[in-house]
Image: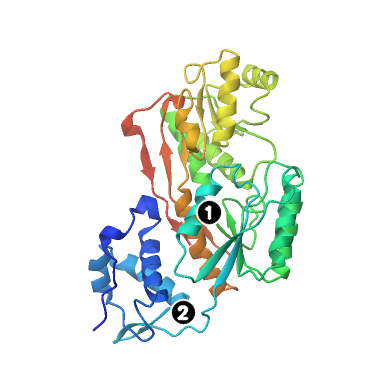
Amino acid sequence: MPRKMKDVSPDQLPAEQNGGPKYVQIYMQLRQAITESTYKQGDRLPSENELVDQFSASRPTIGRALAQLESEGFIQRRAGSGTYVTERSDTKSLVFGLLITELGITEIFEPICKGISQARLGGLHDLLWGPLFQPDAPKEVQAERLCEYYLQRSLSGIFFAPLELSEGKDEVNLRIACAFDQAHIPIVLLDRDICDYPRRSKYDLVGIDNRRAGFEITQHLLDCGARRILFFSRPNSAPTVNLRVLGYREALRAHDNRESEAPVAFGDPADIVAIRELLAIRKPDAIVCANDYTAARLMTTLSSIGVHVPADVRITGMDDIKYASLLQPALTTIHQPCSDIGVTALMAMLDRVSHPHAPPRDFLVDFQLIVRNSSGSASPDANHKRKHDRHK
């Protein structure tokens, strides 16, 4: 008879919105039970029906978790007999590095890293946080120094958040990726690609569906009555911003079948003169900002010149960083489930290590539209979760 897994019950699984898609949670729980020898080599796992009851999950969800374990060599499914733990010869610890120059600067990366760390499984892998070189140096220099540091170590893979907001970012990102390629170190990209859509790099990427997020938040402004909606971003932003622009334009096109390009402006949100000029020329009644930082700086500038949010112009952001709810008025935004992104990134990396020649994949995690006062609508019923699990 298969042994029942110790200390695992549906009550101990974190809620889906806090721990990632349910199949990932089940996969992690079963994987941990195997690596910690709750199930030993040769043991038969509970049947799929038993796992359905144990985890209060559907059969396809259980099947997906088992398929992931089988693809990584942890289990073997034998027709007519059951599912058994296999012998694994690769018992050495895997060591993964974090190459994120915006860690501590851009708020989304700290909880992403926390998600990767908290998903650690009984000694199977270690996470290496590189040192800070030349704190006052440009982030391009920081990134390349970190790259050199990691190349001197025996890494099993690297989690890389490509640089943004600098003119030389593309060349640096490409050099770093090529250096890891030459060292045969797998890369999983966090939040953004190293090239602009519709081009696609050859690396796995974990984040949210930014195109749909741009659509959702623009549609919300349209539902609130806005009609002259502008998209605003800082120059040299990440490729994720271009995807958000596409979604924004698609929402406007779907609303009024406009043929002309919807307006997109680039600039410094703290530049009072430029913002005055932008308002005079475009006369927007709503502005979709590329991220919460841009929205917060823009709201401060608007307040200083006597433009009221949302009475004169509605404002939205993206990311739902910590202070978004503390702004006056509180900021309507898209919530990125950063911890879920971290957990999913680890799963993607482990699968990439096991299957180095698999085609590149996008792992798109759910997001949530958070409606607050800055868009002129803060009804409790307005907040709604858009589920878009796109684990491909």
Colour style of the rendered protein structure: rainbow
Which amino acid does the dot numbered 1 rest on? Cys
Query: What residue is shown with label 2?
Result: 73
Residue displayed at 40% across by 62% down:
24
Residue displayed at 60% across by 70% down:
156
Location of residue 296 by image quarter = top right
Residue 299: image x %, image y %? 55, 24
SS label for mark 1: helix
From what the image shows, is residue 174 above or below residue 136? below
**Measured Cα–Cα span from mark 2 to mark 1:** 26 Å
Which amino acid does the dot numbered 2 rest on? Gly
The crowd level at tag 2 (other Cα within 10 Å; few <14, some 14-19, many 20+) is: some
Residue 230 visible in the snapshot = no
The crowd level at tag 1 (other Cα within 10 Å; few <14, some 14-19, many 20+) is: many
Residue 371: image x %, image y %? 41, 32
Residue 392: image x %, image y %? 48, 62
Q: Earlier in the sequence, mark 2 or mark 1?
A: 2
Closer to the camera, 375 or 212?
A: 375
From what the image shows, is residue 378 above or below residue 106? above
Query: What residue is shown with label 1?
Result: 113
Residue displayed at 68% across by 23% down:
271
